[in-house]
Amino acid sequence: MIEPYEILGVAKSATDDEVRKAYRRLARKHHPDVNPGSKDAEAKFREISGAYDLLSDPEKRRRFDAGEIDASGAERPQQRYYRDFAAGESGRGYGVGSGYADFADTDELLAELLGRGRRARGADLQVQLGLDMLESISGVTRQLALPNGSTINLTIPAGVEDGEVLRLKGKGVAAPSEGPPGDLLVQIAIRPHRFFRREGDDVLLELPVTLKEAALGAKVRVPVPSGAVMLSVPKGSNTGAVLRLKGKGVARPGAPGDLLVTLKVVLPKEPDPALDSFLKGWTPQNSENVRKEYES
């Protein structure tokens, strides 16, 4: 089994941030949505996700580095040798007098190892869940079908990010004996929106406005993730002006993000004789050189 450090291409001394950046770079490259129909990419994506799941969990990473669990997260029986039992509190080694005590210790070792095997947890189960961007912004509850035929209702919190893994304790594969079941790992894949974009908890929108609205100011209807609101376009607005709508971004409880609206002044598609006549006869009072910065 390939070590998770090797899968992500990072050193064992890598920081959490380095591990996260390596995962996101590889996840984008091998994501099934980027490689439709590729079984190799799908298998590689699962391998990358499994490695990140282990290394992003501080306790799992510590136990893996200590040799207590393997790369799949399963317990590793701690090997003990005959010499570990040969000397008791009296300090006696393999000398005469140990008698049948050595064999008793060996029986105890076997019992311990067998007990550990019975307590080994089941394997983790990995699935992928596609979300629309608005669902990731506002949060949603989705019914998720599991490979074993059962279904669960999964609550997706507002602000979940593309590539993020949600862990559901005890919803993975049942243990082969008396151990606890594994976990269900849900990999989030967010589909892009046709006009919204995200930057952290802020949502970005480019809004077309007419020349008249930009020049004279206006109230315009603007879409937001939760519906639509009226926005005041200031008089004399230019393309590239950014207007902020507080709390209209990612609906994170207690600290929602903002909606940042970038204005784009759009001229009429069809010729407008009245506009042409006005502009031909218009002499600006302040003849500003709008290309001054480009002159040498």
Image (tube, grey):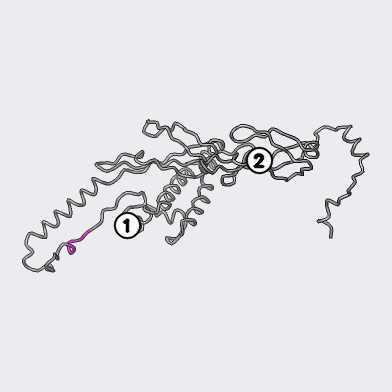
Q: Nearer the viewer, residue 172 or 90?
A: 90
**Residue 81 bears which disc, if any?**
none
Which element is circle 2 on? strand
Look at the image and tell me in which quarter the C terminus lies: bottom right
**Position of 45 compared to 147: left or right?**
right
Give the residue at mark 2. Answer: 205
How packed is label 1: few (under 14 Cα within 10 Å), some, or many (20 or more)?
some
Q: Position of residue 195 (x, y in %)?
A: 64, 38
Asked if the residue at tag 1 contacts the one at tag 2, i.e. Cβ–Cβ closer than 8 Å, the answer is no
Q: Position of residue 13 (x, y in %)?
A: 43, 62
Q: Nearer the viewer, residue 49 or 141?
A: 141
**Position of 36 compared to 295: left or right?**
left
How packed is label 2: few (under 14 Cα within 10 Å), some, or many (20 or more)?
some
Badge 2 or badge 1: first in the primary sequence: 1
Residue 81 sits inside the magenta stretch: yes
Give the residue at mark 1. Answer: 67
**Position of 178 compared to 231: left or right?**
left
- The amino acid beneath tag 2 is Leu
Q: Nearer the viewer, residue 208 or 99?
A: 208
Identify the residue shown where x is 15% and y is 54%: 108
- The amino acid beneath tag 1 is Gly
Which element is circle 1 on? loop
Residue 145 sits inside the magenta stretch: no
Residue 151, above or below 289? above
The residues colored magenta run: 80-84
Q: Quadrant of residue 191?
A: top right
Dominant SS of magenta comes to: helix
Q: Position of residue 8 (x, y in %)?
A: 46, 54
Identify the residue shown where x is 17% and y is 51%: 111
Identify the residue shown where x is 47% and y is 45%: 45
